[in-house]
Amino acid sequence: MAEPDFESQLTRLFSEAPPFPDAELFAAQVAASLDRGWALRRVLIGGAGVAAGVVAAAQIAASRFSSELQTLSLDGARGVSADIDAALHKFNQLVATPASVEALWLVAGLAALALAFAVTRAMEEF
């Protein structure tokens, strides 16, 4: 059987962690990373928004959607419902192409990423 003094000394030695020589440096690095500003996240959120805007603008410009709207507005003699049906038909044809579907998924993904960054920032502030 072990002696009670030895067991208590052994328990005490294992309950206290030995100090590491770089403990102060590690604590300073952790404090610096916690105090770091939100500049990188702001740049990423802004970049995601700009990228989504550029993709959306390129898709609208490439789809000739604006010229279709001009044609619809010039033909005022036709009924409004026929114009809306024609515009929806053109829009459905636009979305039916694989490239535009990929672009819509890209925009949705970037928007979700920006939303996730905004939520993480809101959670950190509260």
Image (spheres, rainbow, N blue to C red):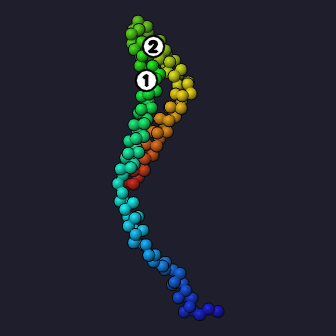
Report helix, strand or loop for mark 2: helix
Disc ID at residue 61: 1
Front-most of 77 and 55?
55
The residue positioned 46% from the left and 75% from the top of the image is 20
Few, some or many C-alpha atoms within 10 Å of disc 2 (few <14, some 14-19, many ≥20)? Answer: some
Few, some or many C-alpha atoms within 10 Å of disc 1 (few <14, some 14-19, many ≥20)? Answer: few
Q: Quick one: which residue is furthest to the right in this view? A: 1
Q: Is the C-beta separation of discs 1 and 2 under 8 Å?
A: no
Task: Establish if 97 lies above or below 12.
Answer: above
Write down the residue under mark 2: 83
> On the rendered image, what quadrant is the N terminus found in?
bottom right
Task: Establish if 19 lies above or below 6.
Answer: above
Q: Is residue 14 in view from this perspective?
A: yes
Report helix, strand or loop for mark 1: helix
The type of residue carrying mark 2 is Asp
The residue positioned 42% from the left and 13% from the top of the image is 72
Q: Quick one: which residue is furthest to the top in this view? A: 77
